[in-house]
Amino acid sequence: MKIDRLKIADALVEAGIAADKASPLAKAFGEAYDEAEKDMASTENVDRIIAKSSADMHKLGADLHKANADIQAAITRQTVWIATIVAAGVGIIIAVSRLG
């Protein structure tokens, strides 16, 4: 968006600044704005960032869901393993007690 330097100069003159000084000031304001505008994000840029962030968050959610499923599967395997070890231990104790 370009700003109207003439309107700025007119406003400066109305504010009591001499016309010969108002024009260079208006030009400087306009150039400063134009330079600052180069660093401003457009609506399209913001929309693109939001869309990418949304996609990244969706992927992160899917990754967390998979990690949770992997953890639950590991817990189940550990539980089965421990139960098997306990059952084997009980079996060994019973066998040893009957032999002795």
Image: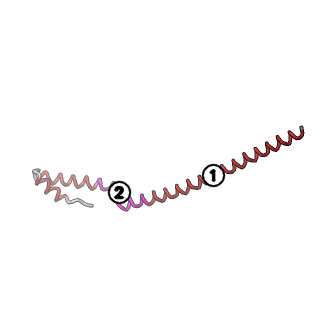
- Residue 67 appears at what percent x and percent y? 59, 52
**Which quarter of the image is occupied by the C terminus?**
top right
- Residue 21 appears at what percent x and percent y? 13, 51
> What span is colored magenta in the figure?
35-50
Within the magenta stretch, is there residue 41? yes
Q: Nearer the viewer, residue 69 or 83?
A: 83
* Quarter location, residue 26: bottom left
In front: mark 1 or mark 2?
1
Where is mark 2, residue-wise? 41
Q: What residue type is labelled 1?
A: Gln
Residue at horizontal 65%, vertical 53%? 73
Within the magenta stretch, is there residue 67? no
Q: Which of 89 and 51 is in front in this view?
A: 89
Outermost residue to the right: 99
- Residue 53 appears at what percent x and percent y? 45, 57
Q: Horizontal placement of 24 versus 81: left or right?
A: left
Residue at horizontal 22%, vertical 53%? 29
Residue at horizontal 13%, vertical 57%? 10
Count the numbered circles shown.
Answer: 2
Where is mark 1, residue-wise? 72
Sequence-first disc among 1 and 2: 2
The correct choice, above or below, for 95 with respect to 72 in the image is above
Principal secondary structure, stretch drawn in magenta: helix
